[in-house]
Amino acid sequence: MSSERLAVVVLAAGLGTRMKSERPKVLHAIAGKPMLRWVLDAAEALTPEKIVIVVGPGQEAVAAAAAPHASVVQQERLGTANAVEAARTELEGWHGIQGRGDVLVLYGDVPFVSPETLRAMLALRRHPDGGEMIALGFEPADPHGYGRLILDGHGNVIGICEQSEIDADPQKSAHGAIGLCNGGTLLADGEVLFAMLERVGNDNAKGEYYLTDVFELANHNARRTQVYVAPEEEVMGINDRADLAAAERVAQERLRRKAMLEGATLIGAETVFLREDTVLGPDTVVHPHVVFGPGVTVARGCEIKSFSHLEGCTLAEGAVVGPYARLRPGAEIGVGAKVGNFVEVKNARLEPGAKANHLSYLGDAEVGAEANIGAGTITCNYDGFAKHRTQIGAGAFVGSNSALVAPVRIGAGAIVGAGSTITEDVADDALAVARGAQTQVEGGARRFRQSRSSEE
Ligand code: UD1
Ligand code: CA
């Protein structure tokens, strides 16, 4: 019997010792998103009635990251079967384990299982003669370390043999040759699963309660078990930082591919780093070595040149940025506007056609349409206590190396002479120069040189 009801249990109580980190393993980020979030996103895509996260003692941060989903604490890390058992009370109020729903178990350190794969497992389970328990299998290039799936002639999973058992028990060493491995994800009739869990023992090499034992037990109880095979990259487990870097490669590869299929050109795609929420419009060109932080939206036809770093910003159509530009949160670059090398923009808006081409800091500012910001211009937005705004009108021209001390307004069409320190508002169409007047002493240089050489 199968039903449409579904609860998900995510196991995240492991110590993650091999990460050698103060931070719980499942909170390490892949493409800027915590590993646990990847798993929860896949789970949420199935719209289950309930999601329960199993955390270890003291892992409040993991529980907080999983909120509003319920979490339970596995008091002692006695193994994956014991971890699922820890969720029993949380699920008891739910109909599932009285036989009216399915339970999907996901491992918090297996981040890339896709909703499509999970749906395929559900379809197998819900097929009229589908199994009561479905394992997610995969065929890794190197099966060492994974549990091996033992099948009978009808495709039933009659047991899963852990690597530790293969290593410890000569009678099981032949299982080492099996290439089909356990991905960790399991889908089962809730009642069957929890009945089998009661019978799992810990008489094995590690002295742990292995979740994987439920397959052999289910078979002994004449329950039908099956396997759904997924691609390896969906099932990769993260155990150490090298695995984390491998996962980052997989995630970036997917994000780059998606961006390119949506019409952006990534020159040297393997050197461009994206976030899941990065939006690149069609015909936008991203040059090599550009890094996107969270919250970047780029319209069509923009160009982002090498070594630029962008986060929390928007680029309107045809904007050109970099090389070596830094766009920080709140930067809004208007249609056809230009931000050149070594220019930092924060919480500032450049209207269409405005240009800041070299060596500037524009913070808490508005720059009007077609205004030109000369090299080295700085908006002095912070007085040590508060931030103040700088407004620059349309068509204004700010000469090189000017300091605009906010709050201050430069009028539309105004010109600021190079090297000015502007502390007062400048009227529309006015010319403002605020620097020491130049003096000149005729022949002064010559006399200086002569006085020096006569001293020798
Ligand atoms: C597990 C599987 C193995 C499978 C592999 C896939 C078991 C016994 N083995 O091995 O068949 O090939 O995953 O990656 O399940 N956890 C708890 N509480 C515990 C122990 C573990 O919550 O007491 C959690 C961990 O946080 C982790 C997951 O369960 O998210 C898997 O545990 P881990 O120790 O990494 O199992 P593997 O040795 O990788
Ligand atoms: Ca693991």
Image (spheres, helix red, strand yellow):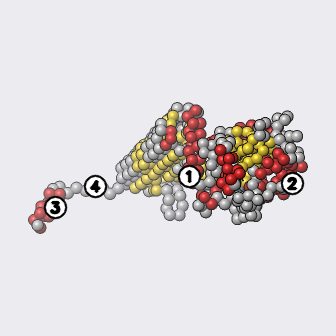
Q: Which mark is residue 92?
A: 2
Measure the C-alpha gap from mark 1 to mark 3: 66 Å
* Kind of residue at badge 4: Gln
Q: Amino acid at mark 2?
A: Glu
Disc 4 vs disc 1: Cβ atoms closer than 8 Å?
no
The percent position of residue 58, horizontal first and vertical second, equals 70, 65
> Which of marks 2 and 3 precedes in the sequence?
2
Separation of residues labelled 3 and 2 (CA atoms):
94 Å
Residue 13 to residue 114: above or below: below
Crowding around mark 1 (Cα neighbors within 10 Å: few <14, some 14 to 19, many 20+) is few
Instruction: Choose top left, top right, bottom left or bottom right for residue 299.
Output: top right
Counting from the top left corner in percent of width and height, residue 91 is at 83, 53
Do callouts 3 and 4 mark residues in contact (Cβ within 8 Å)? no
How many C-alpha atoms fall within 10 Å of the one at disc 3: few (<14), some, or many (≥20)?
few
The answer to the question of whether label 3 and label 2 lie on touching residues, with beta carbons closer than 8 A, is no
The numbered mark, 1 or 2, whose residue comes first in the sequence reads 2
Q: Which mark is residue 313?
A: none
Question: What is the x, y in percent for residue 170?
Answer: 68, 53
Which residue is rendered at x = 82% and y = 35% of the image? 127
The residue that appears at 59% across and 47% down in the rendered structure is 247
Residue count near mark 4 (Cα–Cα under 10 Å), binned few <14, some 14–19, many ≥20: few
Mark-to-mark CA distance, 1 and 2:
39 Å
Q: Which mark is residue 448?
A: 3
Pair 1/3: label in front: 1
Q: Is mark 3 within 8 Å of ligand 2?
A: no
Whether residue 363 is visible here, answered yes or no, is yes
Q: Position of residue 332 (x, y in %)?
A: 54, 44
- Residue that numbered label 1 is attached to: 242
> Distance of mark 2 from mark 4, alpha carbons?
85 Å
Give the residue type at disc 1: Ala
On residue 438, the disc is 4
